[in-house]
Amino acid sequence: MQYALVDNVRREAFPGGKGNCPSCGSGMVAKCGPRVLHHWAHFGRRNCDPWWENETQWHRDWKNLFPELSREISHVAPSGEIHRADIKTPTGIVIEVQHSALTDAERISREHFYGNLVWVVDGRAFRQNFDIYHLLPDPASDVAQDVVWSKAERHMNGANAGMFFRWSEYLAERPGATKAEVKSGRIHSIREIEDEVHRTYCGHHQFDWVRPRRTWLDAACPVYIDFGEDYLVKLETYDESGLPCVRRVAKRKFVHDVMVETSADAIARRFYPLPLSSI
């Protein structure tokens, strides 16, 4: 843990420090060795929060992007079970910064417990299995309404560069068909609509995740993957065709929005000038 109570004041770990857990009140000791991230640990017992994972420098760097009073915020369930959110903003959004793998059951239990939750997942370990392909136009744009994209996958060079069907052409032969039903027809190249794609682009791309961590694809709360760049990659569904896509969101934008928006689903939905101090 980053914080313990020392004389009822939240303090970061310091050599020789002793304090109490802000959640359960148990005694804590500071761990400040030369080869470990300085942190607090419970005396002679496991962490009082069964969801807590050992903190890495990546965790700490993320938490330090936010005000101290937004970090390690405790919640107590009606059953008395204690959970600490990595970050909870003043507007009520909980950010869980997740480095290690989670089971479906673990993910679902946290989503149910916190509700207004957003995941930030450390993607550096699987970056080589995560391919990001061609730009997609804004799904709300006019050009996107008649386009059904061919799913991009590793080693499918045509689809990876951008290939699509026209929904209107499919409807001419099969009236009443939905976009999700379009699987064949005349193949078009992204070059036909390249100018419109660039003009309406707002961060969406096709992608392929080889050997994915499937729990994140099934998540009910927004998932942002951190590959160590200055942007995050948000997992999304592009349109009614069901096409999986990602949307690039600047970290600076993300950090700003979680502090001002009241819903996790509203992050990066509005566009306005950001203060220079956002990150």
Image (tube, rainbow, N blue to C red):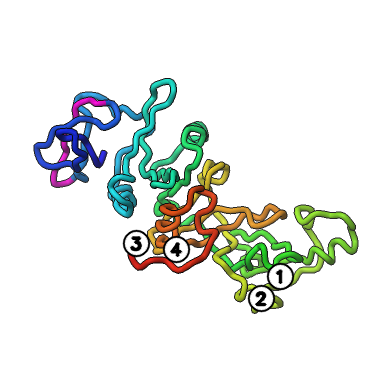
Question: Which x, y percent locates residue 124?
Answer: 40, 54
Most foreground residue, 192 or 39: 39
Instruction: Tell which tag, 4 or 3, sits nearer the viewer.
Output: 3
Are there few (<14), some (14-19), or many (20+) residues within 10 Å of tag 1? some
Q: Which residue is mark 3?
A: 279
Q: Looking at the image, which residue is at 51% across and 31% down? A: 105
- Measure the C-alpha gap from mark 4 to mark 3: 10 Å
From what the image shows, is residue 57 above or below residue 76? below
Q: Secondary structure at mark 2?
A: helix
Q: Looking at the image, which residue is at 13% across and 42% down? A: 14
Contact (Cβ within 8 Å) of mark 1 with mark 4: no
Are there few (<14), some (14-19), or many (20+) residues within 10 Å of tag 2? some
Mark 4 or mark 2, which has the lower sequence index?
2
- Measure the C-alpha gap from mark 4 to mark 2: 23 Å
Which residue type carries mark 3?
Ile
Image quarter hosting the N terminus:
top left
Instruction: Tell which tag, 2 or 3, sits nearer the viewer.
Output: 3
Which residue type carries mark 4?
Ala
Which stretch appears magenta?
25-35
Which residue type carries mark 2?
Glu
Q: Which residue is mark 2?
A: 196
From what the image shows, is residue 54 above or below residue 227? above
Contact (Cβ within 8 Å) of mark 1 with mark 2: yes
Mark 1 or mark 4, which has the lower sequence index?
1
Most foreground residue, 226 or 257: 257
Report the disc number at residue 250: 4
Report the disc number at residue 143: 1
Q: Looking at the image, which residue is at 16% across and 35% down? A: 6
Would you identify the image quadrant in which residue 82 lies? top left
Mark 4 or mark 3, which has the lower sequence index?
4
Q: Secondary structure at mark 1?
A: helix
Q: Is residue 154 left or right of residue 255?
A: right
